[in-house]
Amino acid sequence: MSSDRSPDASPGTARSLAEVLAGGAGTVVLDGGLSNQLRAAGHDLSDELWSARLLVERPEAITEAHLAYFEAGANVAITASYQATFEGFARRGISRERAAELLGLSVGLAREAARQAGVGGARGPLWVAASVGPYGAMLADGSEYRGRYGLSVAELERFHRPRVEVLARARPDVLALETVPDTDEARALVRAVRGLGVPAWLSYSVADGRTRAGQPLEEAFAVAADADEVIAVGVNCCAPEDVDAAVATAARVTGKPVVVYPNSGETWDAQARAWRGRSTFAPEQVVAWERAGARLIGGCCRVGPEAISAITDTLGPVT
């Protein structure tokens, strides 16, 4: 697996993300929820493609959303490819060739935001993570939060491999294998990224100390323990209250840096298509996560630039 800097790497990136994590030079700040930033800018995401629809209709809006997070202090932008799949695009009449172009574009838009953020040289290192959402994200029916699709590991690997190959060719700094609901899909994703020359992180969606499919976290994190391609493991798209135990378990089981980016703590009401409750995400929580082994920290749904700015102020810059 190559750790060399991409020839079109983000401005200010003197070392690869893998090298920075291995060197222990501070904690890397991730961005927040892309969809809520796009909604805040007035974009309608009520579509099966979710934020990926803007890859087709308003790509410049995605760059603007990434830029907002970089300007808030994030070191990493996660691309708009979470729900971008060949199958999902095909349902919209988009050819496989054009879908591959759009997947590559998702990386290019984040890279452009990093370029704009780095103009003048005032920023620290900036990286791009290519989002690889779970199989259930393609189904757009909420099954990404349940897992257990009735598919074998081999079938899931065949689904994921073509997409990760295209994303890898776009030369992101890392592949974000994120919101994974169960260990079968994790095994498939770890197989799918082998030999691509791009490192990856593996991040589960969890609840009450288990994967969304109900497996123990020890079992889940062990999937990536011996995978050289996986440079970090952790959790995302979960309640902040579920993070503490998960960070400790991930660090203990794998010995790898831990990645953490929870939701705000609000609850999604699928019937009303609205968020309920209040945010329980507090920037001071990240200090305990960092002490437990988290080296990449940010936010997911409903965590915006203001919260990312507060995290940056709390953790300090990467050096």
Image: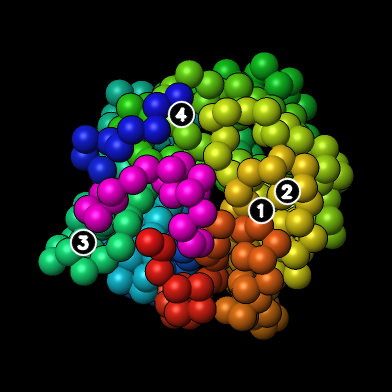
What is the residue that sits farthest to the left in this orientation?
120
User: Which residue is identified by label 4?
Assistant: 164
Could you say where residue 115 lies in the image, as x and y percent from the top left? 20, 55
Amino acid beneath label 2: Ala
Which quadrant does the C terminus fall into?
bottom left
Amino acid beneath label 4: Val
Q: Tell me the mark number nearer the camera, choosing from 4 and 3.
A: 3
Between residues 250 and 106, which one lies in front from this camera angle? 250
Instruction: Evaluate if marks 1 and 4 touch, with contact meaning CB atoms under 8 Å apart.
Output: no
Which comes sooner in the sequence, label 3 or label 1?
A: 3
User: Which residue is identified by label 2?
Assistant: 250
- The answer to whether residue 86 is left or right of residue 7 is right
User: Which residue is identified by label 1?
Assistant: 235
Give me the residue at 50% from left, 61% from top. Answer: 27
Could you say where residue 170 lies in the image, as x and y percent from the top left? 31, 33
Answer above or below: position of 150 versus 235.
above
Query: Magenta segment range?
Result: 10-27
Q: Is residue 50 magenta?
A: no
Instruction: Evaluate if marks 2 and 1 touch, with contact meaning CB atoms under 8 Å apart.
Output: yes
User: Which residue is identified by label 3?
Assistant: 118
Q: Is residue 16 magenta?
A: yes
Give me the residue at 58% from left, 79% from top. Answer: 283
As helix, strand or loop, the secondary structure at mark 3 comes to: helix
Which comes sooner in the sequence, label 3 or label 2?
A: 3
**Residue 116 visible in the current orientation:** yes
